[in-house]
Amino acid sequence: MKMTGKAFAKKLFGARYERLPRTLLIDVIVFWGLYIAGFQVQIAPSVRILMISAFTVGVMWQALSSRDNIAELGHMLMLPNKRREFVFSYVAALGAYAVLTKTGLLFAVVLAVSVWKPIEMVGMLLCMIHAVLMAASVYSLRKYWYAGGIWTAAIVAVILFLGSRAWFSLLLFVNGMFAALILWRADGYAFYQWESKKKRALRQRKKATLWRYFFRYLSCHKNYLLNTVVMWCVALVLPYFLREMAGMSVVPVGFAILSLNTPICILLSRDRDLEQAVRFLPGQKRRFCIPYCLFIFLCNMAADVIFLLSWQIQNGGVTVLMIFGAVFFALQSAVLSVLLEWFYPIRDWKIESDLWHHPRKYVVPVVMLLLAGAASAWPVLLPVLLVLLALETVVLLGICWR
């Protein structure tokens, strides 16, 4: 068990675990910076538990379904192993990765900005372990997805309604033991994801048109498609919250928020074989970057159209200037995302979850938020921004055409 866990840990944290101290140092810096700032937010215990649990489960699920991680798991399964030791070593390594490198930062922020008691820290740590065990057990039972869905919905309801009770930690402990019992009966192949014929065809037919590749890319990665659907749901409810905040002047902020769709903006970073083919073959810069930019633009524009329709239904008053603003922010986000992906692809990632949570994902949304703030404060700047977008588009076409 020790050797198996060490093999997985070295892949996730580096050969000498060099990634771990750097991540922990960042967590300490973030905590101390927010703590001395004196900024305080009242967070209910149930909301705090749900937030930590949902984030940990999401990161753990991404780690379990990562294609690179699945390949490593397949190699390990070819060696002789003890079934239960192998399963718990694998889950422990991925759980340590999820908690220490991802949830740790959120945990530091929550501790810095909220009032808490020492005993609550123990409950939060128990919450993280429970989330890791439950995510792994539900993933091992994904063939029975309906049972996993009902179980997850039940736990979410229990957290929301009973999360503030003193004995809630005991309930988490009992449910965690039940999840551990499921893992006790599982084997390593329960976590191995067999490649379907559709995914194999996607990898073998890259010489087909790029548009077909883009749509197969989404259809073969259901979590990517789910993330896009979630953004559409956000676009539906966002007009209500923005109207309550400041009225119509913050509409550009909604367009900026809807540009945060990470999976469609990391195509080259995620698929190293595709990047090698695109950069190696002549004339591929033009043939790839322009369709890729249009693909991201259409995805962003779909969310913006839903946002405008929802705004018209709830608030009314959609103008031609707002429609031009939607086109501007959708295309501007697409142009910047393609430029980042072409000139600064993410290379130092271990598993796919690193791509989803890399700091680079916030570069484009932050730029969009700054532009949205400027457009909200001075609406007369919007025509200037449209001219700027036209110039940037011409520059991008020139770069791709060379």
Image: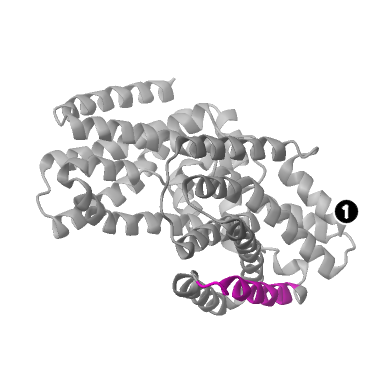
Q: Tag 1, which secondary structure?
A: helix
217 or 57: nearer the viewer:
57
Three-letter code for the amino acid on which mark 1 is drawn: Met
Q: Main secondary structure of the magenta part?
A: helix
Please state, as top left, top right, bottom left or bottom right, where the C terminus lies in the image.
Answer: top left
Q: Is residue 222 visible?
A: no
**What residue lies at 59% left-to-right and 43% top-to-bottom?**
271
For the magenta stretch, what is the residue range? Answer: 165-183
Whether residue 2 is situated above or below residue 367 in the rendered picture: below
Residue under label 1: 3
**Looking at the image, how many numbered discs can be counted on the residues?**
1
Is residue 177 covered in magenta? yes
Local crowd size for mark 1, using a 10 Å CA cut-off: few (<14), some (14–19), many (≥20)? few
Residue that lies at the very extreme toward the front in this rendered image: 117
Is residue 230 covered in magenta? no
156 to the left or right of 369: right
**What residue lies at 11% left-to-right and 41% top-to-bottom?**
320
60 to the left or right of 76: left
**What residue lies at 56% left-to-right and 50% top-to-bottom?**
107
Whole-percent x, y for residue 252 in the image: 24, 40
Please state, as top left, top right, bottom left or bottom right, where the N terminus lies in the image.
Answer: bottom right
